[in-house]
Image (spheres, helix red, strand yellow):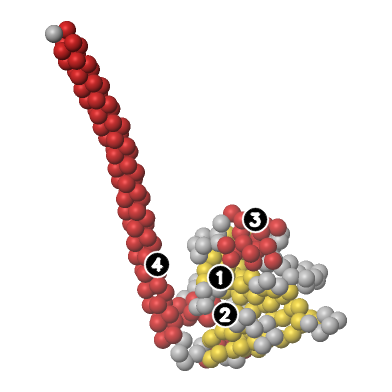
Amino acid sequence: MRKKKQDKNSFKIILISALTALLLLAAIFSVYIYKDLKRVEQSVYNIYQEIKTTNGKIEKYSALDEQSAQNTVKFTEATKNWQIYQNDDFHFQMKSPASWGQFNFNLRNVDAEDNVIYSMGKFHLLGESPFLQLELANYDFNQEGFKPLSSQSLFQTVLRNQTTECENQVFDDLKQLNVGEVRNCYVRENILNQKFLIFRLVNETTGSLLAVYPRENYYLKVDLPDEINAEVDYFIQSLVFLQ
């Protein structure tokens, strides 16, 4: 009788131990499943956020592409009858209305190796007005009274700047040139998406509005009227570099 009772107690102990082990395993498995579900949930959420962000970028770029396409169509239509000037020495090209007349680019200074380091040009039907005159100079050009409006450092900075208001580094690079106070500075793009600057330069004698196109070894500057109309705007967009 006592043996049967002992066997019964042993069976209960084994059963309780087995149930405890099963419950423990179930708890561990539940925790594992819960953590795994959390990881899956987080992964799904991350994927959702990535898709949402990507879709946002696609919509943004689609809008920009559409706007760019519309601007290209407007530019093409507005300038289809304009005359084209192309400079093979510095590989730039621009379009201008016939009413401005022929563009003449005069070589002013040449170094010992006959490389152009400074030049100026204007449209002959615009008279003596300084507006829409072009000036081109190498970064190593040096002459009394001449102050360059760009540098290789500025060229690299403009490339990094978004097409919006000038960042602080642009102002810092312009300040290093010691040409005067720069106001209302913006980075824009021409029709080939090459970046250039528009800003107002204020010093002791002038308060000129300028478009400056920095390149790796030289820059091109255009004197602008105080009010930029559609014709002038299309002109500064048309000024592109072919290399």
Residue that appears at 61% across and 59% down? 170
Q: Compute the Cα span from label 3 to label 4.
A: 31 Å
Quadrant for the C terminus, please. bottom right
Mark found first going from the N terminus, 3 or 1: 3
Q: How packed is label 1: few (under 14 Cα within 10 Å), some, or many (20 or more)?
A: many
Above or below, 62 against 231 in this view is: above
Q: How packed is label 4: few (under 14 Cα within 10 Å), some, or many (20 or more)?
A: few
Marks 2 and 3: which is nearer the front? Answer: 2
Q: Compute the Cα span from label 3 to label 1.
A: 18 Å
Q: Is residue 183 left or right of residue 42?
A: right
Image mark for residue 240: 2
Q: What is the x, y in percent for residue 24? A: 28, 27
Q: What is the x, y in percent for residue 126? A: 58, 85
Residue 116 in sight here: yes
Q: Can you identify the residue that label 1 sits on?
A: 195
Residue that appears at 20% across and 19% down? 11
Q: Can you identify the residue that label 4 sits on?
A: 61
Above or below, 119 against 144 in this view is: below
Marks 3 and 1: which is nearer the front? Answer: 1
- Is 114 or 52 nearer to us in this picture? 52
At label 4, the amino acid type is Tyr
Residue 204 in sight here: no
Q: Can you identify the residue that label 3 sits on?
A: 172
Q: Secondary structure at mark 2?
A: strand
Mark found first going from the N terminus, 4 or 2: 4
Mark found first going from the N terminus, 2 or 3: 3
Mark found first going from the N terminus, 1 or 4: 4
Q: Secondary structure at mark 4?
A: helix
Q: What is the x, y in percent for residue 214? A: 64, 70
Marks 4 and 2: which is nearer the front? Answer: 4
At label 3, the amino acid type is Asp
